[in-house]
Amino acid sequence: MTITEVRSETVTEAPKAGTIDMKFEIVVIPVSDVDRAKAFYGALGWRLDADFAGDDFRVIQFTPPGSGCSVIFGRNVTAAAPGTAQGLYLVVSDIETARTELLGRGVKVSEVFHGADGVYAGPDEPYLFGRNRVGGPHPEHGSYRSFVSFRDPDGNGWLLQEVTTRAPGRVEGDTAFGSAAELRAALWRAATAHGEHEKRNGGEYDANWPDWYAAYMVAEQAGTALPL
C-alpha cells in the first residue's frame, strides 16, 4: 500500500478570526554525544543560540539560516532514543545549490532525488529514505518534489525539500516569502516571465513593470492564472 498525494480545497482552510498565533519554533533532536552533535550542527553553518548547562542538564539550541524554527538537544532534554528523529524537513529554494553547500561543509549527502509514489513513499518508508527514491530532480521540476537527504552522527534524518512556489493558502500577506532567498527566487521568476511579456508586446519597455511584477507574484502565490 502506498500513500498518494491528495489535494483538497478544504486543506487550506483559513483560521477563524480571533485565533491566537501559535508559532512552531522548537524541534527536539535526541543525541548520544552532545559535543559531537554541537560540532556537527555548527559545521552546517547554523547559528548557535544557546548552550546552557546545570548540574544534571545541558541544552544547546541551533537555528538554520533563514528559519523561524530552531532545534535543541543536550543532556536530559528528551527521553527519546538517539537517532529516532526522522523526516525533518529543511525547505530550500534551490536544491542543487543547497546540496553543493553541504558538500563543501563536509556533510555526507545523497544525490538529488524525487519519490516514485509522490512525496510520501509508503507506511514503512514515509520519509523517502528507502527504495522508492528515483534519482534526479522531479522531471517537471515541480515545487515540493525534489529532495536531498542527510543524517547527523546519531542517525537523525534530515531532508532538504525544494520549494519554488508555495501552495495556495500556505502563506498569507507579508509572510509569503520566508527568507531573502525565497523572495530573490520569486523575483527572478517574475523577471523571466516579464521578459517574455515584453517580447510579446513588440519588445517595448514596459514602464508599468512594478504593477506587472506585483500581479504576477501574487497570482503565483495564490495559484491563480498568471498574467501574460
Image (cartoon, grey):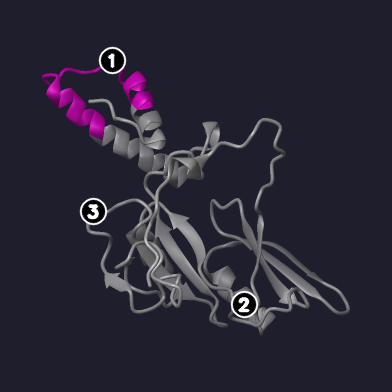
Badge 2 crowding class, 10 Å Cα cut-off, few under 14, some 14 to 19, many 20 or more, is many
Q: Could you tell whether 207 is left or right of 162 in the image?
A: left
Q: Position of residue 202 (x, y in %)?
A: 11, 19
Residue 204 falls inside the magenta stretch: yes
Which is more foreground, mark 2 or mark 3? 3
Badge 1 crowding class, 10 Å Cα cut-off, few under 14, some 14 to 19, many 20 or more, is few
Q: Which residues are magenta?
A: 193-215
Judging by the rendered image, the residue that carries numbered circle 3 is 140
Residue drawn 37% across the image and 47% down it? 164
Q: Report helix, strand or loop for mark 3.
A: loop
Q: Tell me, yes or no, if residue 212 can be seen here.
A: yes
Q: Position of residue 157 (x, y in %)?
A: 51, 74
Q: Position of residue 58 (x, y in %)?
A: 78, 74
Badge 3 crowding class, 10 Å Cα cut-off, few under 14, some 14 to 19, many 20 or more, is few
Q: Amino acid at mark 3?
A: Glu
Is the residue 227 above or below the residue 123 in the image? above
| Mark seen at residue 37 | 2
Q: Amino acid at mark 2?
A: Ala
Q: Position of residue 133 (x, y in %)?
A: 32, 72
Residue drawn 53% across the image and 39% down it? 13
Q: Amino acid at mark 1?
A: Ala
Is the residue 88 above or below the residue 155 in the image? above
Which is more foreground, mark 3 or mark 1? 3
Q: Nearer the viewer, residue 109 or 46?
A: 109
Residues under labels 3 and 1: Cα distance?
Answer: 33 Å
Of the residues under marks 1 and 2, which one precedes in the sequence?
2
Residues under labels 2 and 3: Cα distance?
Answer: 37 Å
Judging by the rendered image, the residue that carries numbered circle 1 is 207
